[in-house]
Image (cartoon, grey):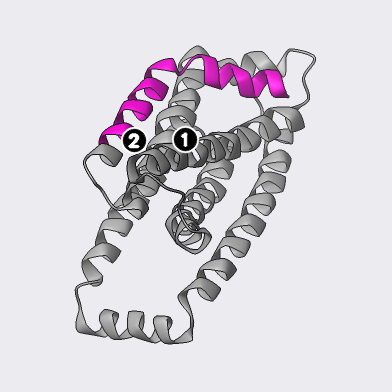
Amino acid sequence: MWRLVWKDMMVQRGPVIALVAFVIYLASAGMPTFLVFLFGMLMAVTGVVLRAISRDEENETLALLATLPVSRKEIVMARYVGTVFVMLVSILFSYIVMTIAKGGFIPIGSLFNSIGVPVVIILSLAAVLFPIYYWLGYDAMRYVMTGLIFLAAFLALLTALPMTQLFFRWLEGIGFNLILGIAVLISIVLYFVSMRISMRVLDFTDL
């Protein structure tokens, strides 16, 4: 399984180099910690994982792997584990860059707030997109992803409404860290459930 994970990393050197330069630029430009983690993590996952899927689709790698002495369960696990690995590496790298840029360590509370939202976004998106990819193919996954991007843009516009601002104040009164922690736990559970679904789907998919 780990060879499959490493395969995706090795064929995506270009996006990795671009990610390194992008995070360093954001940190040196004085961007807020939250935005550095958000853009860095999202760019890492989309640039490495999704491009790896696109390349696998072009080369029909999934069908080739199915003919090798590798179980379909391992193929799916490699994709999910690889996504988490890329996310964790991007967190570590962004943290190191921000620590150097700010000249000191980031407090644990601020760090959790900075990485919590991107973690929820990435795990939730992957939990939705990966089963679609294994069931309906890359094109269907791409269409759904485009729809989710437009949905995210629409939700971002809603944040300017007075009712939305009242809702945010209500969340702050309850405790943002508590809500974020619950959201992270839910996204992790959904991610594992999604992996099990993808395993079952690929078992019954004709490659």
Relative to residue 18, is residue 114 drawn left or right? Answer: right
Evaluate if marks 2 and 1 touch, with contact meaning CB atoms under 8 Å apart.
yes
Q: Residue at x 48, y 48 (%)?
A: 122
Q: Is residue 14 magenta?
A: yes
Q: Position of residue 23 (x, y in %)?
A: 34, 35
Q: Which residues lie in the magenta part? A: 1-25
Which amino acid type is shown beneath numbered disc 1?
Phe
Q: Quadrant of residue 130?
A: top right
Q: Residue at x 40, y 47 (%)?
A: 37
Residue at label 1? 93
Q: Is residue 165 above or below residue 200?
A: below
Numbered marks: total: 2
Relative to residue 192, is residue 89 drawn left or right? Answer: left
Residue 23, numbered label: 2
Q: Is residue 57 magenta?
A: no
> Which is more N-terminal, label 1 or label 2?
2
